[in-house]
Image (tube, helix red, strand yellow):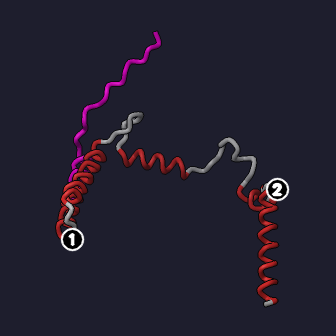
Amino acid sequence: MGVVPPRIPEPLHFGRREVIVLILGALATAAAIIFLLESSVTDTRLIVGFPIVIAVLFVALAFYRDRAHGDPFEERFLRIYRFYRRERYLVRGSSSRSPRGILNDQSGLDDLERIAIAGMIVVTIIFILQSCSL
């Protein structure tokens, strides 16, 4: 009663996007191998390991799907990017102070910050007066 059935994962989808990402991964891996062989790198672990890491990352990128929505990586990335670039209306605490109010409001400084700023100003004035008297 009221039990949600488990979500059955979809099998790997092998479409045009995945083929393009895998081809780009193969090109990036080949470029890394050529670059490492042509350079003065003599460490075999680096020559073998770096292209393998690139290939694995591109395979993961090709077949990645968001669990909640089933979107590929770029759609999830764009959704997160749009979320952080949104206008912040109706967000808790956003209406109490506007950005202009924060800039113009001097009461936003704590007493400790005011004392520290005053101390820096006094030390700067003393330093300038001592350097002028020499």
Between 15 and 93, which is closer to the camera in this rendering? 93
**Above or below — where is 70 with respect to 61?**
above
Does 8 lie within the magenta span?
A: yes
Residue type, label 2: Asp
Label 2 residue SS: helix
Q: Which residue is mark 2?
A: 111
Residue 116 lies in quadrant: bottom right
Tag nearer the camera, 1 or 2: 1
Mark 2: give few (<14), some (14-19) or many (20+) Cα within 10 Å: few
Judge whether 124 appears above or below 71 on screen: below
Quarter of the image holding residue 26? bottom left
Name the residue nearer the viewer: 1 or 117.
117
Comparing 107 with 2, the one in front is: 107
Residue in view at x 32 percent, y 25 percent: 8
Q: Is label 1 in a helix, a strand or a loop?
A: loop
State left or right for residue 133 relative to residue 30.
right
Q: In the image, what residue occupies the spot 22% across and 52% down? A: 52
Residue 40's disc number: 1
Image quadrant containing the C terminus: bottom right
Residue 74, percent across and down? 37, 49
Where in the figure is residue 62, as x and y percent of width and height? 28, 46
Q: Residue furthest front?
A: 134
List x then y, in percent, for residue 112: 79, 57
Q: Which mark is residue 110?
A: none
Query: Which segment did they paint magenta?
Result: 1-27
